[in-house]
Image (tube, rainbow, N blue to C red):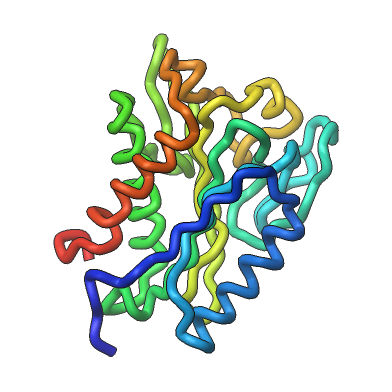
């Protein structure tokens, strides 16, 4: 199959919080449409009401306080929190059309790069850490997680994706061990003194996307 570096992407933005089960059903329907019917790739930007999701590696002991509904996500990873003020990006891409050899590790690197470039738009230096999933911010002599990553692939079409903490209530993370990683906190753009309307965060994500996913340099 010929690989294209300029594949159209449909961007969807939901103005109201979307329930988790409804979002999961919509994602799975779109993934099937991409894989079987040639529907366009899609990035869906949304927020959820407060909830926890457990990935395929989630440990029951990491659910410390079941204060919000808990859902089995089916994605990789462990427990994470979603809620108001957090931008979730569900990313549904056909890797067979975007990569010479479909490679999930490379795709996760691209998700990390998308977050790093988006944060850089607001003067923040997001960083990778070996053995720690997500994107991290070094500040005040410590490191805190500002963005999470969890993916699943079906028929080489990706779904689930990333979440970036913009203005969430960070105390809501206290009910879990985020992503099973002990000894580190979570942070947000707001907690770091960067006040960004969600629409501006969305714009930065959209502007950062082509350089990561449509560039032959990174292909």
Viewer-proximal residue among 49 and 82: 49
Q: Is residue 145 left or right of residue 29?
A: left
Compared with 3, 162 (above or below) is above
Snapshot quadrant of residue 95: bottom left
Instruction: Quarter of the image for the N terminus: give it.
Output: bottom left
Q: Residue 127's spot in the image, x, y percent? A: 34, 34
Compared with 53, 65 (above or below) is above
Compared with 67, 95 (above or below) is below
Question: Which residue shows up at 76% across the image and 30% down it?
Answer: 175
* Total number of numbered discs in the rendering: 0
Question: Which residue shows up at 34% across the image and 62% down it?
Answer: 106
The residue most toward the front is 15
Q: Residue 66's spot in the image, x, y percent? A: 84, 35
Q: Is residue 16 left or right of residue 142?
A: right
Question: Which residue shows up at 56% across the image and 81% down it?
Answer: 33
Q: Residue 204's spot in the image, x, y percent? A: 35, 40
Q: Is residue 66 left or right of residue 24?
A: right
Instruction: Quarter of the image for the C terminus: give it.
Output: bottom left
Question: Which residue shows up at 47% across the image and 41% down it?
Answer: 134
Q: Is residue 58 left or right of residue 186?
A: right
The residue most toward the left is 217
């Amino acid at each position: 199959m010929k690989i294209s570096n300029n594949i159209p992407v449909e961007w969807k933005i939901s103005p109201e919080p979307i329930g988790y089960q409804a979002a999961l059903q919509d994602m799975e329907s779109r993934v099937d449409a991409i894989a079987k019917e040639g529907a366009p790739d899609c990035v869906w930007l949304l927020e959820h009401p407060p909830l926890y999701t457990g990935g395929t590696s989630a440990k029951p002991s990491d659910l410390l306080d079941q204060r919000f509904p808990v859902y089995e996500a089916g994605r990789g990873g462990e427990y994470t929190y979603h809620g108001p003020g957090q931008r979730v990006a569900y990313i549904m891409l056909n890797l067979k059309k975007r990569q010479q050899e479909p490679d999930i590790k490379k795709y996760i690197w691209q998700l990390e790069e998308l977050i790093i470039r988006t944060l850089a738009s607001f003067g923040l230096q997001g960083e990778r850490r070996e053995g720690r999933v997500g994107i991290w911010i070094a500040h005040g002599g410590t490191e805190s997680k500002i963005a999470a990553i969890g993916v699943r692939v079906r028929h080489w079409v990706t779904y689930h994706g990333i979440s970036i903490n913009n203005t969430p209530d960070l105390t809501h993370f206290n009910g879990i061990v985020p992503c099973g990683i002990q000894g580190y906190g979570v942070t947000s753009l707001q907690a770091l003194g960067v006040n960004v309307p969600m629409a501006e965060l969305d714009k930065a994500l959209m502007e950062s996307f082509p350089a990561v996913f449509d560039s032959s340099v990174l292909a």
